[in-house]
Amino acid sequence: MERGVYRLLRIDAAEQMGCRRYLASVLAFSGIGLVALVALQALQSFLPGNPQHLPGVPWDLSFNTAASFITNTNWQSYSGETTLSYFVQFMGLTVQNFVSAGTGIAVMFALIRGFRQIKEQGLGSFWVDLTRTVLYVLIPAEPRVRHLPGCRLASSPTSSPAQKA
């Protein structure tokens, strides 16, 4: 799966980014996420997954919500079920819950590498760090994902083989 993500997004897994390029990648990714999340909220009346026919969210509330989810503070000044459609909650907020946490963890890895490799060049690749964090740490750690078919963590650690029979 990891290699497929790299091929799809044209990521060089062996790339070593300097601190400026790593920072630029983090800011570009977060900026694109911010714009996309604001757009999803503003355009939700035209998008699928809106059975309540909720109108678009005003720009100031859209920006506030998007900025809080991009920065992983998840501060909300609205009632989700009466303000945001199912589609926006799923494709916008839920996705940001994973990728904003992944961004923070990737930056932490780069910081650790920076302290460890004082004289060497390169902090690794932001894109590789983000991909691996989301695929191997955050998604498997989500309890609702553990029960999906094909997930490596499908069996509960508290269940024994005798309980499954």
Image (cartoon, rainbow, N blue to C red):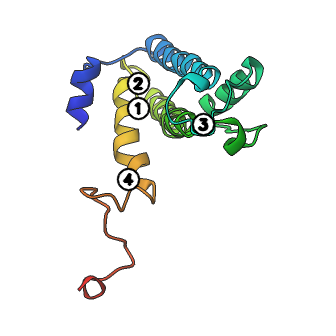
Per the image, label 2 sits on a secondary structure element best described as helix
User: Mark 4 Cα within 10 Å, few/some/many (few <14, many 20+)?
Assistant: some
Q: What's under tag 1, amino acid-wise?
A: Leu
Residue corresponding to mark 3: 85
Disc number placed over residue 140 in the picture, else none: 4
How far apart are labels 3 and 2 at the CA level? Answer: 31 Å
* Residue 43, image x, y percentages: 60, 20
User: Mark 2 Cα within 10 Å, few/some/many (few <14, many 20+)?
Assistant: many
Please name the residue shown 56% across and 35% down the image: 50
Residue corresponding to mark 2: 126
Mark found first going from the N terminus, 3 or 4: 3
Mark found first going from the N terminus, 1 or 3: 3
Q: Nearer the viewer, residue 24 or 154?
A: 154
- Please identify the quarter of the rendering in which residue 65 is found: top right
Whether 59 is drawn above or below 52: the answer is above
* Residue 148, image x, y percentages: 33, 58
For the residues bearing labels 1 and 2, Cβ distance under 8 angstroms: yes
- Please identify the quarter of the rendering in which residue 75 is found: top right
Residue corresponding to mark 1: 130
Question: Of circles 1 and 3, which is in front?
Answer: 3
How far apart are labels 1 and 2 at the CA level? Answer: 6 Å
Q: Is residue 82 left or right of residue 142?
A: right
How far apart are labels 1 and 4 at the CA level? Answer: 14 Å
Q: What's under tag 4, amino acid-wise?
A: Pro
Per the image, label 4 sits on a secondary structure element best described as helix
Q: From the image, which quarter does the C terminus lie in? A: bottom left
Whether 6 is drawn above or below 134: the answer is above
